[in-house]
Structures are given as structure tokens and as C-alpha cells.
Amino acid sequence: MTGHRGGRWRLVHLLLAVPFIAMIWIGSYDQTEPAIAGIPFFYWYQLLWVPLGALFLLPVFRAEERDRSGRE
Amino acid sequence: MTGALDWTALTVFALLFGLVTILGFVAARWRQGDLSDLHEWGLGGRRFGTIVTWFLLGGDLYTAYTFVAVPALMFGAGAIGFFAVPYTILVYPVLFAVFPRLWSVSHRHGYVTSADFVRGRFGNHALALAVAVTGIVATMPYIALQLVGIEVVIAGLGIHGELPLIIAFVILAAYTYTSGLRAPAMIAVVKDLLIYITIITAVIYIPLQLGGFAKIFAAVPAAKLTIAAGNATNWGGQSAYVTLALGSALALFLYPHAVTGVLSSSSRHVIRRNAVVLPAYSLALGLIALLGYMALAAGVKDMPAYADGFKEFGANYAVPALFLAMFPNWFVGLAFAAIAIGALVPAAIMSIACANLFTRNIWKEYINPKVSGAGESQIAKIASLVVKVGALFFIIFMPQQYAINLQLLGGIWIIQTLPAVLIGLYTRWLNPWALLIGWAAGIGTGTAMAYAVGFKAIYALHLFGITIPCYAALATLIFNIAVSVILSAVFNLAGRGADATQAADYL
């Protein structure tokens, strides 16, 4: 995956692993407290990870876009 | 719904259904291309930009069956059903990192299916055939289950018998035949608007009626509110939950309909952009899952009006019953139309994806290698009809449980193509014959596991004195990879087939 055409592996790609760690570590969220607006922790925490997951993709996306614009 | 027709709901439903039917036929002229070419019919000319792809993949992956079955699982089994949320969170890093590579190499070499890629990458007919057949067999019951989604809401409207289902499917078959992938792409826009309207209304309006989220969650038995924690010798429900999410996330983009959605986009950047913006659907899915608890809190199960529906469809009737109990008639019509149209989009894409596989990897490969471009498109159109008629027969003449069991098996089967397709995108060190044996080993053990526990997804593995309840797909995938790696080390000594692709093709 080297080469001048982009798609290079960079340190920022490690961010892609963060949602996996967060979701696989079920012990960190398998509980009802603290609840927010009557919604137990288990539910709102995982729902929160939907936008967080996208947020962790963003820097990787930006880095790859920069690679691309530098090339063209 | 004791036989009484709900005319208001039915009228709204029929109007919306009519609208998407017209759209389906008009779609043939959208971004016009020569529909007698497989790239045009089966991949929409590979011209879909970020927004169309967003609607298309959203409509494709978040199916009507998902919208019915996920809350049904929450309704019946509790927190375990929420695995759909981590599942759809983990899908996107995979989509982002891996599938632009599939897009690039497919674009370079004119691949229409993942089996096309495997054929080119490993130069092995047998492995490509295994990937193609797995895709078709895993997708067919999935199409059948979309019909269940339509069946459930039609019954909710008070209509009985198979005729409306047959009519809906004939319409679907007709516009898929004429318009190809453009039809579901266009209809997906309407479907998603309706789904979002329904969901946003439901998660605001229903909790207000039921006295807030605290009351809704209070209706769920405490033991079902979280996953049972494990201990040193038995990992309990937690390992089941995590492996379900992980296994499903890895399997999703191996399904032919997902590959078709990916390959129809106009560039690899469209795919990456979508990996960032598609999670909006996951949020909707998470909220839809909670409808299962709202149905518990509303007590629809014990209402005599819905007894027939629950008797016929089981927990799958929870959401329709909830809507009927909570919403005014006209909105019930809109919400049910959202679900029914939500079934048409994936059913169309799935049948197109199966047709592409059949045409490229069975017909062209084994029956008529000299088939012309127009001939390919014609075969694919007919294959898409056959696939849909097959699904319709299946759902009318077989017990619904067969389709559910087969769809579960489909998930276990499709993930066995991961080493060839997904790992194959990065390296061709794995030997095709080793991959084929690994695939067979995965399919064999996976099917045996599912059978042993009476077609449940979770199998209790016993390793080193520890009981690990685990999604059978993930456990057997690891076995498959182990077999593939060990045998590759041996087989590679004898040399490998030719690789039609180069490193630069993937970037």
C-alpha cells in the first residue's frame, strides 16, 4: 500500500479502530445508570456512539482528501 | 383489525404506493443510458453521486424487515435486540477502509460482482463460483423476508389473503425489469423521506402519549434492560451481544446487494463520504429499535384488536400494532406505506444483485462465454424475475419460519466469503484452493452449529473450560481463516494461478 497514488497507511488510520474498541468493551456500558431523560445508560451511550463513530472517521477522511488534492 | 378495513389508512397507503410505482417506471429515463448493457441496467451506469448513493445504500441496508424485526426482537427478548446499533456503528469503518479498494479495482477491470473480482484476483473458477453461489443463496431468503414486511403491514390494514402481496410483487418485478438499478435508487428517496417522517413523529408523539421514556423503560422487565453479565467460566450474554454486532458488521458488505450499491457509485470518494454520512440511518435504526419497548409499554399484546395479528406474525406484529394503537388513521397509512415501500427498495436491489451474479459468474462463465453485452443484460433481467418469483413462492407456500432460518444461515454463509473478497483486496498470499477449503469448512461447521441449537444465531463454544456464547458466523469465520492460512502455507509451495490485477488498480 505504498506508492505515489495515495491510499498510504498513516497513523491517523488507527482512529478507525476506536469504535471497535468502544463497542467490544461491553463491560463499560452494560448498565442502566446514569439514565438521561428516563433512557438507561446502555441505550443512550450506544446511540451516542453513532455520531461519535462518524466523528472518528472524519480526520481519516480529511487526511485522505488532502492526499488526493496534493496529487491532482 | 378483526376483518374491518381501515379506509383512510388504506387510501393514503394506496396513493403513496401508486406514486412510487410511477417513479419506478419513470426511472428508466433518469440519467439515461443504454439499458441493454449490464453496467447500465445492473449498476445504474456507475454514475450515482454522493446523495443518490446515500439514499440507495440507506434504502438497501436498512430494510423493511430490519424495521420490523429489530423492534420485534426488543419486544420479545429485550436488550439483546439493541445489538443492531453497535452493528451498524462498526459497519462504517469497514466500508470506509476496505470498499474504496473494491470500487477502484472493479472500475479498472469492469467487474460487476465480488465474484468477478475473486475470479480476476485469484484466477480460479471454482473459488469464484463458490463466492457467487454463496451470494445468491444467502440473498434469496433475505428477499423473501422483505415480503414478510409487506405482508405484516397489509394485514395491519385489515386486508387478508395473498393477492395484495402478489400485486405488489408484480409491480416491483415490472419496473425492476424495465429500469434496473435506477428504479430502487429513485424510489429510495421517497422511502427514506417517509421513514424519517414516521420515525421522528413516532419517537416524539408516542412517548408523549405513554408518559415519557422513564415509563416506557419501566415497562421492560429489569432483567431484559441490560445484557446478562458473564463470569470466569461463562461469558454469558455479553459475548453473544458483541459477537453478533461484530459478525454482522463484517458480513454486511459481503452481501451482493451491498456490493451492488457500492459499485454503482461514481467514485471511490463517494463511498468514503457516505461512510461518514450514512450513520444518520443508524440513529434512526436505534430509535426504531426502541419502538419495541414502546409496544411493550402500550400493552398492545393484550389488546383483543391485535390478537389475530400477533397470532399470525408473532412479535413481528409489535410495530404495526403500536402504530395502529397510537396514530390517527391517515398517519397509519403513511407509516405502513413507509414500511412496504421500504421492502421494495432492498428487494429490487437484492434481485438485481443476484441477477448480476448469475449472469456474470454462472451464465457467462459456464453456459455461454460468448454472450454479448446486450445478451448479458437480457439474461440478468430474466434472472431478476426468476429470483423474485422464487421468493414469492417461498413466502406463500412455505412456513415463514423457513425463510427466517434460512436468512440466519445466509449470514453465516456469506461471511465465509470474507477471506477471498475482503482479505483478497489486500493480499493474494492466500491460495485459492486453500480459500475454497476454508470456505467449505466455515459453511459446514457454521451450518452444523446453527442446526445443533435449533436455528439460533448464538452457539455456546466450550474452550479451555470456558463457555463462550458466540455468534456462529464469527466463530466459524475464525476457523475458516485459520484453515485458509495453514493450507495456503502448504499449497503455495506448488505455485498459484495468475493475478489479472496490479497493486495500482486498488488505489
Image (tube, coloured by chain):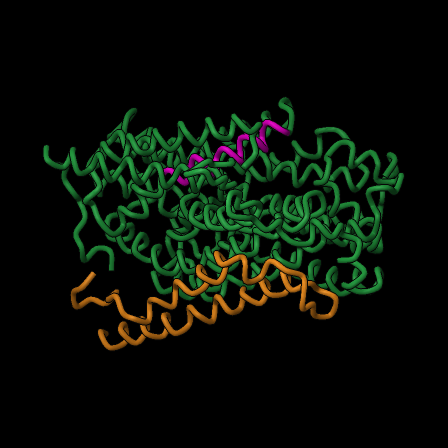
Chain colours: A orange, B green
Residue B408 lies within the magenta run: yes
Is B307 left or right of B23, judged from the image as shown?
A: right
Above or below for B475 versus A67: above
Residue B347 lies within the magenta run: no
Q: Residue at x 57, y 58 (%)?
A: B189
Check the image and name the residue furthest to the left.
B494
Residue A69 in picture, x, y percent from top left: 28, 76
Q: Residue at x 61, y 43 (%)?
A: B65
Residue B193 location, quadrant? bottom right
Residue B38 in picture, x, y percent from top left: 36, 42
Q: Nearer the viewer, residue B222 or B55?
A: B222
Q: Residue at x 24, y 31 (%)?
A: B125
Q: Which residues are magenta?
A: B401-416
Q: Nearer the viewer, residue B343 or B421?
A: B421
Above or below for B461 versus B223: above
Is A59 left or right of B305, judged from the image as shown?
A: left
Residue A15 in picture, x, y percent from top left: 38, 68
Residue B383 location, quadrant? top left
Q: Quadrant of the N terminus of chain B?
A: top right
Main SS category, magenta section: helix
Residue B110 in picture, x, y percent from top left: 27, 47
Q: Residue at x 22, y 34 (%)?
A: B487
Above or below for B403 versus B40: above
Whether residue B280 appears in this view of the structure is yes
